[in-house]
Image (tube, rainbow, N blue to C red):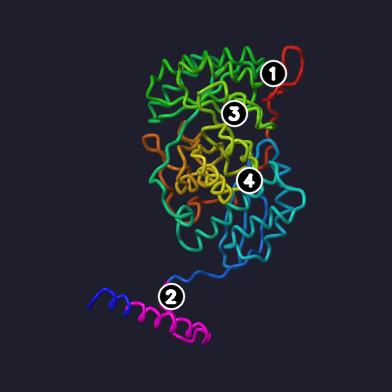
Amino acid sequence: MNKQTTRRNFLGATGTMAAAGLGWALAGREATAAPASSRSIPKMKITRAEPVLTGSDVFVRIETDAGIVGYGDATNNFLPHTVEGALKDMIPYLIGEDPERIPYLWESCFRRRFQRGGPSTGCALAGIDQALWDIKGKAYGVPVYQLLGGLARTKVRVYGHVSGNTAAEAARQAVQRKERGLTAIRFRAFHSYDAQDLHEHKLAVRQQIEYLAAIREAVGTDVDLILECHGRYDPEWAIELARLAEPYRPLYIEDPVRHENPEALKRVREHTDVPLAIGERYHNKWDCREAVINQWVDYLRPDVCHCGGITEMMRIAALADVFYITLIPHNNAGPLGSAATLHAALAIPNLTMIEAPWANGDAQGDVVKPFPTVEDGYALPLDGPGLGVTFDDERAKARTFRQPSLQPRLNATDGSVRDF
């Protein structure tokens, strides 16, 4: 039998099978289908959704007629009541819908509202989106990262924080973090100036370098240091900070300038080779566009509780991947938001590490448990279906919502307003 005959026979058989398949379809699928899984996936509809304000958190709770309940974290410590209002505006678009249609519901909540974008929309969508993924994971009995395509990595590197009103205190904390196995540490200085409601660029730059030098000396060169600026500096001062920081080899400078005008990053980028990162105050992929396509940053830092959730973070990651930019997601959430961050991080190919404030010490959950386990500086996948956490509804109801305290009202020495 020659190759041509073999190929002819194969194509003939293939054509016969295709025709048979077409006939089966045209006959109204009367043929017997393959055996179904022993586990039946229920057809669901959303019956109820509500914001849950408890402690200092804003959560989203979504119920289905299949008895499966999903939870998401929409916490914004600066605008909790506006997020609550946005959730109440979006919830009518969910009722009666199939919770498995996550991209459809995301678009529905975003695009059916004429006024959209910004932090309230981003956080409200984030909570809804996380809750939908939680429901879907529970329905299929798998962790959310499996629904996102599976493990791009088996564990996720994390970074912790240090603070302190002096460089010596920050360095002491950094040694403690290193002893806990953390290999990356973020810090910002000017805590002592915050206590005075003062921000002067020159003083802040001087203190940032003082802290950086002390921490680097304390932990050595094996620990990566992240220099957090909180978006406080005007471009010329961010450039000066980068110049002075370069000998200490920070992993990157975070939020060196204010976020309203992303093109200000261009000026900083042109004057330093120190890696730059931005993104915690971006609320969707469009906010990220200029920084990414112009390659003004080395790392992008969306927050899964602020940027529209897991669905939008995956889209942001895909956009960044085109330009070889990797993600280091911002995260200051409790166990629920941290779980959502971890699930996305496990599935995103272009990701370096995640922020993990719970790794600074022995953090315990309250309404939501547990925090992800950290071993040798890496967060391990959570067990269980959905987001892999438990939500205590009764405890949430019992906790009074506490309006977050006002941030420092920073002024310059001349009395003009400065950024927190």
Residue 337 horizontal side relative to residue 152, left or right: right
- Tell me, yes or no, whether the two marked residues, 1 and 4, touch with CB atoms within 8 Å: no
Task: Inspect the image, locate mark 3, and give the three-letter code of the amino acid beneath it.
Answer: Asp
Residue at 31% across, 80% down: 9
Task: Inspect the image, locate mark 2, and give the three-letter code of the amino acid beneath it.
Answer: Ala
Q: Quadrant of residue 406?
A: top right
Residue 255 is marked as: 3
Mark 3: give few (<14), some (14-19) or many (20+) Cα within 10 Å: many
The residue identified by callout 2 is: 36
Q: Quadrant of residue 221?
A: top left
SS label for mark 2: loop
The percent coordinates of residue 17 (x first, y second) are: 40, 81
Q: CA distance from mark 2 to mark 4?
A: 37 Å
The residue identified by callout 1 is: 197
Span shown in magenta: 10-38
323 or 135: nearer the viewer: 323
Q: Nearer the viewer, mark 2 or mark 1?
A: 2
The percent coordinates of residue 260 (x first, y second) are: 69, 32
Task: Locate the N terminus by quadrant.
Answer: bottom left
Q: CA distance from mark 1 to mark 4?
A: 29 Å
The residue identified by callout 4 is: 74
Residue 108 horizontal side relative to residue 317, left or right: right
SS label for mark 3: loop
Mark 2: give few (<14), some (14-19) or many (20+) Cα within 10 Å: few
Q: Specify which label sits upstream in the sequence, 1 or 4.
A: 4
- Tell me, yes or no, whether the two marked residues, 1 and 3, touch with CB atoms within 8 Å: no
Q: Is residue 55 visible?
A: no
Q: CA distance from mark 2 to mark 1?
A: 65 Å
